[in-house]
Amino acid sequence: MDTAEEADICRVCRSEGTSDKPLYHPCVCTGSIKFIHQECLVQWLKHSRKEYCELCKHRFAFTPIYSPDMPSRLPIQDICAGLLSSVGTAIRYWFHYTLVAFAWLGVVPLTASHIHGSTRSWELQL
Ligand SMILES: [Zn+2]
Ligand SMILES: [Zn+2]
């Protein structure tokens, strides 16, 4: 009998899942390291202080994953926060450079007009 090969075991404690300690598939790893007890995962998370799998870099989800192809829980808040802050920074930079550009467009032709006498053709070249 090769049922031992078929049995899913926890990657931490190497024991099978039971009804009171079911096995979870919290990341996208496959094979013998695919499953883990929630208790073992919590212990590992405390020990490693990481929220993601060190092998597949997938952020652990505390819900059973029924299919490896099923889209798993994404850190949406993290993505949104990162996106918002980068958009905010981009808008600030854009605003800053727009003001600088307006200042230059206003100041330079005026200054140039004093130096060159005529700014008409110089402005058109912009
Ligand atoms: Zn375990
Ligand atoms: Zn993994």
Image (cartoon, rainbow, N blue to C red):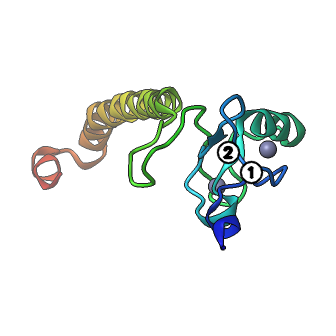
Quadrant position of ligand 2: bottom right
Left or right placement of residue 85 versus residue 114 in this view: right
Q: Is mark 1 within 8 Å of ligand 1?
A: yes
Dot 1 or dot 2, earlier in sequence = 1
Residue tagged 1: 10
Residue tagged 2: 52
In the image, residue 79 sits, relative to residue 54, either above or below, namely above
- Residue shown at 73%/49% (left/top)? 16
Instruction: Depth check: give the residue in front, 29 or 111.
Output: 29
Left or right placement of residue 33 versus residue 97 in this view: right
- Residue shown at 65%/32% (left/top)? 19
Instruction: Depth check: give the residue in front, 59 or 31.
Output: 31
Quadrant of the snapshot with the N terminus:
bottom right
In the image, residue 89 sits, relative to residue 68, either above or below, namely above
Can you give x and y, in whole percent of width and height, for residue 114 in the image? 28, 39
- Residue shown at 39%/54% (left/top)? 69
Q: Residue furthest bottom?
A: 1
- Residue shown at 83%/41% (left/top)? 44
Can you give x and y, in whole percent of width and height, for residue 49 in the image? 82, 37
Query: Label 2 near label 1: C-beta < 8 Å?
Result: no
Q: How many marks?
A: 2
Can you give x and y, in whole percent of width and height, for residue 79 in the image? 48, 35
Please, what secondary structure does the residue beneath circle 2 have? loop
In the image, residue 118 sits, relative to residue 20, either above or below, namely below
Instruction: Depth check: give the residue in front, 63 or 115.
Output: 63
Residue 68 image-quadrant placement: bottom left
Look at label 1 and name its amino acid. Answer: Cys
CA gap, disc 1 and disc 2: 17 Å
Left or right placement of residue 41 versus residue 90 in this view: right
Can you give x and y, in whole percent of width and height, for residue 109 in the image? 25, 39
